[in-house]
Image (tube, rainbow, N blue to C red):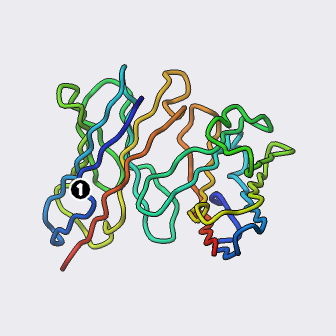
Amino acid sequence: AQSVTQPDIHITVSEGASLELRCNYSYGATPYLFWYVQSPGQGLQLLLKYFSGDTLVQGIKGFEAEFKRSQSSFNLRKPSVHWSDAAEYFCAVGAGPYSGGYQKVTFGTGTKLQVIP
Amino acid sequence: EAGVVQSPRYKIIEKKQPVAFWCNPISGHNTLYWYRQNLGQGPELLIRYENEEAVDDSQLPKDRFSAERLKGVDSTLKIQPAELGDSAVYLCASSREESGDPFFGPGTRLTVL
């Protein structure tokens, strides 16, 4: 069965510092990987996704993620964090090559990001 | 364009009572999802619709949960009767087609006392 592990429940970074959120997945074939952000009272917003091709994926809001098959990881990064990035971040893995990867999507438990001045 | 609309945003009920959530997807979006998000967890898919057809309801607890999307637009998710363990945020999402990126609504936070 597919699964996603986000080992960090809570991370605190200073504004302007770099950020890396960890995500490890388990999936038997080529994974379809996603990062979502959830701000308080807001719905989930897709930051970026990886289906194939270049393993370094650029997303919205200055985020990027790198797919490393050998490590079963898809870590999210941002070079300089802004106070508005404080939110909860979810990594997800999808099954099925013929639905844009949204069939049977499994989400991780999330990482809460706190940004301090 | 307007986003996914969900109502109510908050609902508090006593156990054994019925409750219903409503979702209005983005106009033109044929695919609709209902997810449940327990506290401290990621969302879990309950049901997925393609137009009015429920194409994946394998995770829907059918003894007490039901859903409908009669005209392939709005959708309602119902719980009857509610249990304490049903306290969660219920998220609706929609996409233009099954291969499209889903857009999520703000969710309905249900508290069962």
Q: Chain of mark 1?
A: A
The image shows residue A25 at horizontal and vertical percentages of 31, 35
| Quadrant containing the C terminus of chain A in the rendered view | bottom left
A99 sits to left or right of A66: right
Task: State the residue position of label 1.
Answer: A8
| Quadrant containing the N terminus of chain A in the rendered view | top left
A49 sits to left or right of A77: right
Q: Which of the 4 image quadrants contains residue A14?
A: bottom left
Neighbours of disc 1 within 10 Å: few (<14), some (14-19), many (20+)? some
* Residue farthest bottom in this picture: A117
Q: Which of the 4 image quadrants contains residue B32?
A: top right
The residue sitting at 70% across, 75% down in the picture is B13
The image shows residue B113 at horizontal and vertical percentages of 63, 75
A79 sits to left or right of B41: left
Q: Amino acid at mark 1?
A: Asp
Q: Nearer the viewer, residue B113 or A35?
A: B113
B27 sits to left or right of A45: right
Q: Nearer the viewer, residue B97 or B88?
A: B88
Tell me the SS state at disc 1: loop
Residue A46's place in the image compared with B21, above or below, is above
The image shows residue A19 at horizontal and vertical percentages of 18, 57
The residue sitting at 70% across, 52% down in the picture is B25
The residue sitting at 76% across, 61% down in the picture is B81
The residue sitting at 21% across, 50% down in the picture is A77
The image shows a total of numbered marks equal to 1
